[in-house]
Image: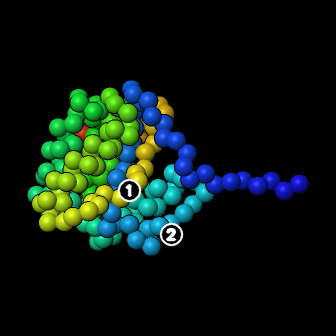
Amino acid sequence: MELVIQKYTNLPHIDHVGYWQFVTIRTQDSIDEAFLSIADEDISKEQFKKDEYADLSLKGNYLNGEILQYLYEFLLSLDSILYELACFCIMPNHLHILFRQKESLALIIKKLKGISAKAINKQLGFKGKFWEKGYYDKAIRNQKHFELTYRYIAHNALKVGLKSEERFYGKYDLL
């Protein structure tokens, strides 16, 4: 008898108020065929490979200058309202954010993407989708996982030669 393993594409997110979440959101224009072709059996490795690709890609690089400053302030403005913010890093075409949920994950992402997309589109003179439809999220499992994720976010801009002080915000001294 042959064992058939199905690939599930619509598994639910771990979504509980009080959970720490690591979330990555990308600009719509940063998603191309090369990005979509990256796949691995281990979702964490796949995500890492996609992050490496996005870090070096010039596609969808809108999160600079005034847009970077707006998004930095916007993410901080949601602290203590939708989430308890630990840290974030805004790369030119995606962002990483680590937070403890105060609301449902779906509501947090909807507000974060919806409000910022409207403001960024207005600044850039764009219409339509700004952020990719989906997002990557991973619930934090323990203290070690939290610290590794925090450090990953903290070093994301530095590893590609960007100024961390412009792109990274962190509440804790875990470096």
| Residue 104 vs residue 83, the one in the foreground | 104
Quadrant for residue 94, please give it: bottom left
Quadrant for residue 133, please give it: bottom left
Give me the C-alpha separation between circle 1 and circle 2.
17 Å
Residue 59: percent from left, percent from top:
30, 71
Quadrant of the snapshot with the N terminus: bottom right
- Which residue sits furthest top? 18
Q: Which residue is mark 2?
A: 37
**CB of mark 1 within 8 Å of CB of mark 2?**
no
Q: Is residue 78 left or right of residue 2?
A: left
Q: Residue at x 23, y 29 (%)?
A: 80
| Residue 144 in view, yes or no | no
Quadrant for residue 105, please give it: top left
Q: Residue at x 19, y 66 (%)?
A: 126
**Circle 1: element type:** loop
Residue 14: percent from left, percent from top:
48, 36
At label 1, counting other C-alpha atoms closer than 10 Å, the crowd grade (few under 14, some 14-19, many 20 or more) is: few
Q: Residue at x 17, y 37 (%)?
A: 77
| Residue 47 vs residue 114, the one in the foreground | 114
The amino acid sitting under disc 1 is Lys
At label 2, counting other C-alpha atoms closer than 10 Å, the crowd grade (few under 14, some 14-19, many 20 or more) is: few
| Residue 88 vs residue 107, the one in the foreground | 107
Establish if 123 lies above or below 140: below
